[in-house]
Amino acid sequence: MTRHDADRLRAVVDTAVDGIILIDESGSIIMFNPACERLFGYGAGEVAGKNVKMLMPSSFRDGHDQYISNYLTTGRKKIIGIGRQVQGLRRDGSTFPMELSVGEHKEDGRRVFVGIIHDVTARTAAEARLEQAQKMESIGQLSGGIAHDFNNLLTVIVGNAETLSLKLSQQPELRQLSDAIFAAGERGAELTQRLLAFGRRQVLQPVAIDSRELLGELGWLLRRALRDDIKLVSDMPEDLPWILADRAQLESAMLNLALNAQDAMPRGGEVNVSGRVSSLNVDGVVAGDYVEIAVSDTGEGMSPDVAMRAFEPFFTTKAFGKGSGLGLSMVYGFVRQSNGHVSIESAPGVGTTVRVFLPIATGDPVVARVSKDHVAEIAPKGNETILVVEDDPHVRTHVVGLLGRLGYVVLTAESGDEALRHLADGARVDLLFTDMVMPGMSGWELARRARALMPRLRVLYTSGYPVDTIDGAGNGAADADILLKPYRKSVLAQRLRRALEETEKD
């Protein structure tokens, strides 16, 4: 090789982005390019002549000696010419994933091995994030389906318990039992809402919120919810922008985070709630500025494995009966459905910080399409004809009984096709009360085809799986009248009257 060729090769080696290292048959380092210096934290002079094993974690060192020994003895290539992923050991003791490709050539009759090292830390982290995101999405779909089925069951349980309570008004002991069933059913409904929140299947009502004012108001509640040995500290800038989110869900999320922080500090400590504007550029959300609300504690902290699973529903490190494992999963689902991002930083003995990033409110905020029901306990009656379409036989029987006691004439169908046959046969119906999630024809498609036969037909939808009522509804979803399961008799009665009275005004 001429001097000119050698200089050219040295220029290539010195400017290469990837690390290039040369070792002899004994494993001693002959060359260590600048990229290797940056990767491992050693200068070339510090490693020259030393065994390459100093750059490997202990778990890889024995294997390295065996590979070289086997190759020199048998000529069988297990590494040479074959790229593989291994771990590198930096000067500071930290490790990093790298792709290693090994080649060989001979100098003065002796073998020299050339290693090309590519740092794959960023790629490995991205793959881990993608795998976790896919896992969370799968769990979310499963939890949403479970919540839908549970809401059907709870509709029957809550509804019948409510009816029993009314009938047992003169028998206090039995009334107490029915009230207990009713209360347990409503608690079950709260848990399914948390499942829907995690799966991003809940119906949100995003509005512009002064986050500083909201968290100031929450401070009063949190100070009374937290133990006396927990100090609450708040740091909210005066000019913190307004955010776009569901106020009730944000309040619930902040309360969950504070109570989780308290649980991590059994001997007392500090909960710090702070806010700022942060630029965000992560997978799954639009890059830009967000309002970041961070809730930190000085508690026991979590290992990396536990922190990775902290947002999964039903995952908890608390003792049996001390928690459902749905608090953080609800926060995760609410934030992601709000087009935001949530992250967790924790280390054993250091504490935990959960960062919630929510969109900044700009212009006129869009109010949710489906409003919550805050109605009195009055159950108005009627005498119109209602076509009930529900594939679950238990729910269908329960609804027919409710409507009969409210004075309505009831027709039933267990599918969209059967409902359309009723209408095609001349049934005169004042209102269609249909489930949205059914095998075959959806409630939305049924309503569209039913209105082709009866243009003035009013429709009240119901579902235990709110996302289907929105995403599957097409461009008319914004006007859909949706009653979420489980519901109380009074809520059903008032929603029916509202829909029917709108018919009369037309």
Image (spheres, rainbow, N blue to C red):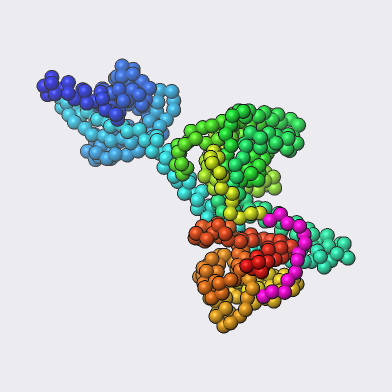
- The quadrant in which residue 222 appears is top right
Q: Residue furthest bottom?
A: 425
Q: Residue furthest front?
A: 506
In magenta stretch: residue 376:
yes
In the rendered picture of this protein, how many numbered marks are placed on residues? Answer: 0
- The quadrant in which residue 483 appears is bottom right
| Residue lying at 31% horizontally and 16% vertically, measured from the top left | 45
Q: Quadrant of the N terminus?
A: top left
Q: Nearer the viewer, residue 112 or 334?
A: 334
- Residue 258, percent from left and from top: 66, 37
| Residue lying at 54% horizontally and 41% vertically, measured from the top left | 363
Q: Is residue 301 visible?
A: no
- The quadrant in which residue 354 appears is top right
- Residue 448, percent from left and from top: 52, 69
- Residue 12, percent from left and from top: 22, 26
Q: Nearer the viewer, residue 177 or 78?
A: 177
In magenta stretch: residue 144:
no
Q: Is residue 349 above or below residue 391?
A: above
- Residue 141, percent from left and from top: 52, 55
Q: Quadrant of the C terminus?
A: bottom right
| Residue lying at 36% horizontally and 35% vertically, measured from the top left | 120
| Residue lying at 55% horizontally and 40% vertically, measured from the top left | 361
Q: Is residue 349 above or below residue 44?
A: below
Main SS class of the magenta portion in the image: loop
Q: Residue furthest left?
A: 2
Q: Is residue 495 visible?
A: yes
Range shown magenta: 373-385
